[in-house]
Structure formats: structure tokens, C-alpha cells
Image (spheres, grey):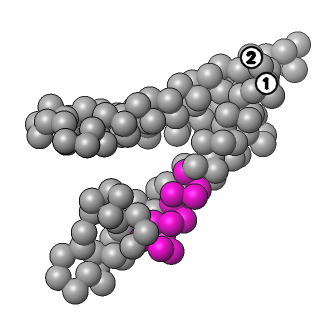
Amino acid sequence: MKIAARILCGLVALMFLYNGLLYMFAPHMQLDATMIQPIGDGIFGMSNIRANIGAPMVTFGILYAISAILMEVTTLRVTALFLVLAIVARIAGIISAGVDPENFSIRILVVLSVFLAVAIFGSRVFANEGEVAES
């Protein structure tokens, strides 16, 4: 179980890091897929996209990587909190605006739920591993 949790956390870390780095260094590649567009000349908007989307994604990718490498429970709990809030925000968006015609909102909601399940699974496995090691 420990190896499976480490692998799953590592895979989620890579996904977060990949997307976050794209938002930070090549946001134009992500904007069409996410349907986000900066207003006006776009310089400040692109800076906000890099900082407000890319940086948190990279941060959570690093936290997942730390969890996978060190079997650290606390970092997984932080990522789980972020994912719970992201899921709440997605649900609030679906309730207030409805589901988009391409069902991207639902797809992202499923992906976030899978990432949350990995965080919960990993934190339980790593917490149990710590208890066994201390005995």
C-alpha cells in the first residue's frame, strides 16, 4: 500500500507541476483550454494568471512531491484542504451558473475529486506507516 500511495502522490505531483509550470511560463498554451482571457493589453492579466493560478499549482505539486518522497502526512492534509475548497468552488459555480455545454466543469470536478481521494488515501497510508515505525 505504501508504494501505491507514493506512486499515486507522485503522479498527482507531476500533473500539478506540469500544469502550474505551463501557467507560469507558457500561459497562452493553457488559456484556450481553460477559457480564461486577460482584458486589455493583457500584461497585468497574464501576470495575474501566472501568479494566481500557476504559482498555487506548482506549490501543491511540490507539496504532493514532498508527501510522496518523505511519506509526509501534513503536506497531504494541506493539499486536501485546497482540493476541498476547489471542489466547493466548482460546485458553487455549477449551482450559480450551470454546467457548460462541453461539461468541462463536471470533468474538472471529477479530476479534483480523484486528486482529493489520492490525498486522503496517501495521508491514511502514511499515517499508519508512521505508527508502525514508532512501535
Tally the numbered discs.
2
Q: Quadrant of the N terminus?
A: top right
- The residue that disc 1 covers is 2
Given contact means CB atoms under 8 Å apart, are the residues at marks 2 and 1 in contact? no
Q: Mark 1: few, some, or many residues within 10 Å (few <14, many ≥20)?
A: some
Q: Residue at the location (33% across, 70% down)?
A: 48
Name the foreground residue: 62 vs 111.
111
Q: Residue 17, how many percent across, how many down?
A: 59, 56
Q: Residue 20, how many percent across, how many down?
A: 51, 60
Going from N to C along the chain, the mark reached first, 2 or 1, is 1
- The residue that disc 2 covers is 128
Q: Find the magenta span and give its range.
A: 16-27
Amino acid beneath label 1: Lys
Q: Secondary structure at mark 2?
A: helix
Examine the image and state in which quarter residue 10 appears: top right
Q: Is residue 40 visible?
A: yes
Q: Residue 91, how many percent across, how many down?
A: 25, 32
> Please, is residue 79 above or below residue 19 in the view?
above
Q: Look at the image and say whether residue 30 sits in the magenta stretch.
A: no
Q: Is residue 63 visible?
A: no
Give the prevailing secondary structure in the magenta stretch: helix
Q: CA distance from mark 2 to mark 1?
A: 9 Å
